Amino acid sequence: MKAIGFKLNTTASLFIFLACLIVLFSFTSEHFLSYYNITSLLTNISYSGIAAIVLTLIIISRGLDISIGGVIGLTTVVIATLYSQNDPLPTWLILLIGLGVGAIVGMINGWCITALDMDPIITTLGAMAITRGLAYVISDSQSILMFEDTTDYISNGAIFFIPIPIIIFLITALVFSILLHKSKFGRAVYAIGANEISAEFSGISIKSKKMILYILSGIAASLSGIILIGQTSVGMPQHGLGTELEVITAVLLGGTALSGGKGTIYGTVAGVLILGVLFNGLTISGVRYVHLQIFQGILLLVAVATYEIKTRNEVAR
Amino acid sequence: MKSTLLKMSKVCKSYPGVKAVDDVSIDLFSGEVLGLMGENGAGKSTLIKMLSGAEVMDSGEIFINDLKVDVNSPKSAQKNGVSVIYQELITMDTLSVAENIFVGQLPLNKTTKLVDWKAAEKKSSDVLSLLNSDINPKSIVGTLSIYEKQIVEVAKAIHKNAKVLIMDEPTAALSEKDSKSLFEVIDRLKNQGVGIIYISHRLEEVFNITDRVSVMRDGKLIGTKTTKDADKKEIISMMIGRELSQFFPEINLEKKGVAFKVLDLNINGIIENINFEVHRGEIVGLFGLVGSGCLNIARSIIGIDKIDNGEIHINGKKVSINGPKDSMKNKIGFIPIDRKHEGLTLDFSVKKNLSLQSLDGLGASFIINNSIEDSIAEKWIKKLEIKTPSVDVQVKNLSGGNQQKIVLGKTLETNPEILVVVEPTRGVDVGAKMDIYKMLEDLCQQGVAIILVSTDIPEILSISHRVLVVSTGKIRKEFKKGEANQQDLLYEASLN
């Protein structure tokens, strides 16, 4: 295992690990490789995958956003509440407002982190509590039903047999891999994470870059919320509970370093897929949800530990 | 008759490629202040580190009260009564004065076995009053002034029964008044029989408070003089010794008008009424000792240090600069003092470092144009003769000289008309130094105005057209090229 990890680069070894999991589960369950299971697996990971893609950039810049789950919940509640009014606004406007919820939370996060120089973990932890609380207040702790064609199509429709959430996830991954790996903005993000002081001396406007990242992260979370509302036909304050943990685990599993400056979109895609396959495979093999949670926690710790051990070896050499 | 408190005999210490301390022997009597002087890199710090247990010597012996001792850790140094007060104070700022003084040995109540705060505070007050200080033992150290923090450190040392006290540039960050108070404390300690090794660049104070002066240069002890028989110029020539190296290029000055001017720059308590101008094609040197404010002047030009008042003019027009981005817009380039933390992104490749300051120029769209980026990297690798296996090697794997060239290259890629360079050749080998000087010479000929901040005296004297000497935040003296020698420069800089 160790030898493989050192010879191959991180992303390649992740995809090999993914392949092993798929082979393993195809033996443990005959349903695993069915069209229905594969599409439902991919659809399920799409919604957290979108948030994970954007979070990758934040972690590379040496930040963190744990308000994702709260924003998802608040978005679903806001959208469902607006839709359940007697004379609702047009759906496109409601969805836009939904995305605006994430943008505003992201803007506030970004402002605290850049203008007030607050710690990203604490800032977004506060935002998580506030957004979740607001969701409960607005919905009066009730689930709000929402049967609506557009959201239903976004979450359950398909183009050429490919479910739309998967298409949204793939497009997000593609757009952000170009942004991160090919663009000037992406280079600045890496530079900020690798050494903020030298980035500042190099004339990079750090604050505006960070602001953009947190706004994008908020919007991505709201987009996840929109997909979730279509999948469940309900807006409720509990939506997205624990999603931040899932998303952070996927990003770190994909080789992005909490210490900043390192990470790729391909790695995160691999991380999201591994997490999705593992959960799906274990579930259909009969493992209970409560046990899966323990698995997820262990996986997060293993991902971080692997990174720490690798860094220590690099330093020792 | 004073007894010998400390004796270091034939001490040696080598690092890869350099003999930091070479066969040095010094002694210290009780109740004596021994000044230790030398240029940057002379070996003073290494010598002190071996005495304090921070470094282990390769060979040599240390005697305390004529008994040979092994000093191989800070703890063993403390046990032998040696304490150091470093220039960067290492107080625990969130704790109280008493906790700092008694760190690790707070007195316990006999019955409850809990900390006896009353006793700790009482004893702290006693130690502090020995030092003529009325700092409240309950105060949080972080709220104290630098001078008070120093006193806390001294009190801590006294409490640990320090017989040998080493002070590294203690007045570097102190006002004149606080310095005087510190000298009184030093006097008291002397009378109590403590031996003090006093490291300072400031000639005046070394002559005022020391009994003898030892001078180091290039890792060797050059000599020890009794202070009252010594002459300042003599000490300075002992420190410098070497003649100006021959490899400095002769840079002719053709004045082509004023490119850059600062008017009454002030940072409260740090720099005061700084005025100077730089012509196109001119190199103006700023020389000052540690803590003189030179670095702050340089940093305030690019808006990293915020000025309280003052103006910056470029080509006759007033500009406002709030940070490196603004300074780049105004065609000011900056080579920072610390290439590893401020100048470079060590995990980035050579190519990505060289293009980082010119990201906007890498193609018209938001996508990086790889061929433009490659050509930038290749241009500077060739121009500055950067030795690297490829453009994709991480810069952390390169030598100091090549790293410094990359810092220079990434800044020059922005085509600055004014260049502020801070210690451009610190920790750089001779070959790379020559390449860097050659580059500065070329820039002058192209009409770039250069502000050089350097503590390397031969360097600043040789390549500057004018040198401004800065001390305690003010410009004290201006020398035109050839007007000053090394002694003059050091002499002016050590006045306050």
Image (spheres, coloured by chain):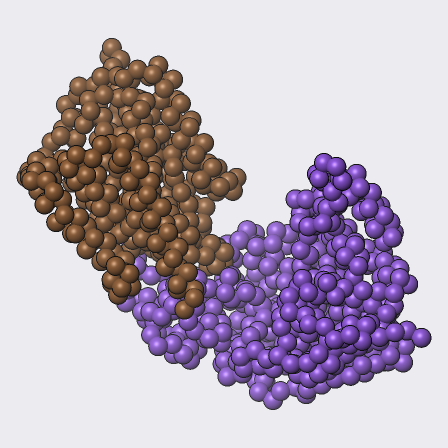
Question: Which residue appears farthest toward the top when viewing the image?
Answer: A86
**Residue B494 can be seen, yes or no:** no
Image point (39%, 27%), residue name: A131
Q: Colour of chain A?
A: brown
Q: Residue B438 placed where, x, y %?
A: 51, 81
Which of B395 and B301 lies nearest the eye of the viewer?
Answer: B395
Which quadrant of the structure image shows residue B291?
bottom right
Which of B81 and A10 lies nearest the eye of the viewer?
Answer: B81
Left or right of residue A206: residue A226: left
Question: Which residue appears farthest toward the front when viewing the image?
Answer: B111
Q: Is residue B433 above or below residue A288?
A: below
Which quadrant of the structure image shows residue A80?
top left
Q: Residue A245 placed where, x, y %?
A: 34, 38
Which of B31 and A40 lies nearest the eye of the viewer?
Answer: B31
Left or right of residue A30: residue A268: right
Tell me the quarter of the image containing the C terminus of chain B: bottom right
Image point (23%, 57%), residue name: A13
Left or right of residue B206: residue B286: left
Q: Colour of chain B?
A: purple
Q: Residue B166 placed where, x, y %?
A: 75, 66
Tell me the quarter of the image containing the N terminus of chain B: bottom right
